[in-house]
Amino acid sequence: MTDTTNTPLPTSPADATSAINEQAAGRPFKVLGIQQIAIGGPSKARLRTLWVDMLGLEITGNFVSERENVDEDICAIGAGPFKVEVDLMQPLDPEKKPAVHTTPLNHVGLWIDDLPQAVRWLTAQGVRFAPGGIRQGAAGFDICFLHPKANDEFPIAGEGVLVELVQAPPEVVKAFSALAAASA
């Protein structure tokens, strides 16, 4: 895997098209499964009461970012390559953006087998990405976000939902491939 930290996203569908013209007939990546669900609120304490105290999720980490205006507890459901994160988020400053608490279901993260290829292909198809490019996320994986709103240049978006694409590590790709092969 190449280092994609802070890799800029293509700026137009035309920019991405040349990189994937040999793959034009098919999708050159796979969505493997749910990587995370992020839930925002004004107080992590209230979110923890439900998700940790009542439902039994384990807090596995914490992530604080001034840039993202977030203080989040990283929780987990499941184990191994099928573990799904549930991020409980509150804003560092409720008056600043991004306002992680204003949309209770903040975003859904999807495991992707080849994130750079997915970004090139999706951009060429007219999918709008949020600013920031491919970068390292809270859990240490390369990530980027599909914008929740389309525009004239990029007419496909999350229709109100922020969608995070997450580069799956090799063990997750292998586990999902084995699962797919066993069910074929």
Image (cartoon, rainbow, N blue to C red):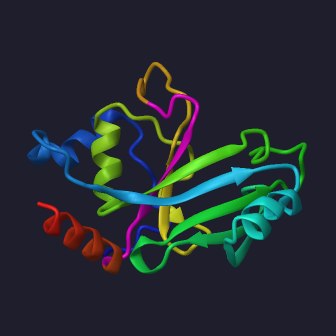
> Which quadrant is the C terminus positioned in?
bottom left
| Residue at x 27% of width, y 44% of height | 121
| Residue at x 69% of width, y 52% of height | 39
> Is the residue 166 above or below the residue 124 in the image?
below
Tell which of 74 and 184 is nearer to you: 184
> Which quadrant is the N terminus positioned in?
bottom left
Where is residue 138 drawn, in percent x and y?
62, 69
Where is residue 152 drawn, in percent x and y?
46, 19
Numbered label tally? 0
Where is residue 41 drawn, in percent x and y?
81, 49
Point out the stretch of residues depicted in magenta: 157-170
Tell which of 115 and 52 is nearer to you: 52
> Is the residue 155 above or below the residue 56 in the image?
above
Q: Is residue 42 left or right of residue 107?
A: right
Tell which of 71 and 87 is nearer to you: 87
| Residue at x 20% of width, y 73% of height | 178
Where is residue 7 drawn, in percent x and y?
45, 60
Q: Which residue lies furthest to the top in this view?
A: 152
Residue 66 can be seen, yes or no: no
> Is the residue 179 above or below the residue 117 in the image?
below
Residue 47 can be seen, yes or no: yes
Q: Is residue 139 magenta?
A: no
| Residue at x 35% of width, y 31% of height | 126
Instruction: Give the quadrant of residue 61.
Output: bottom right
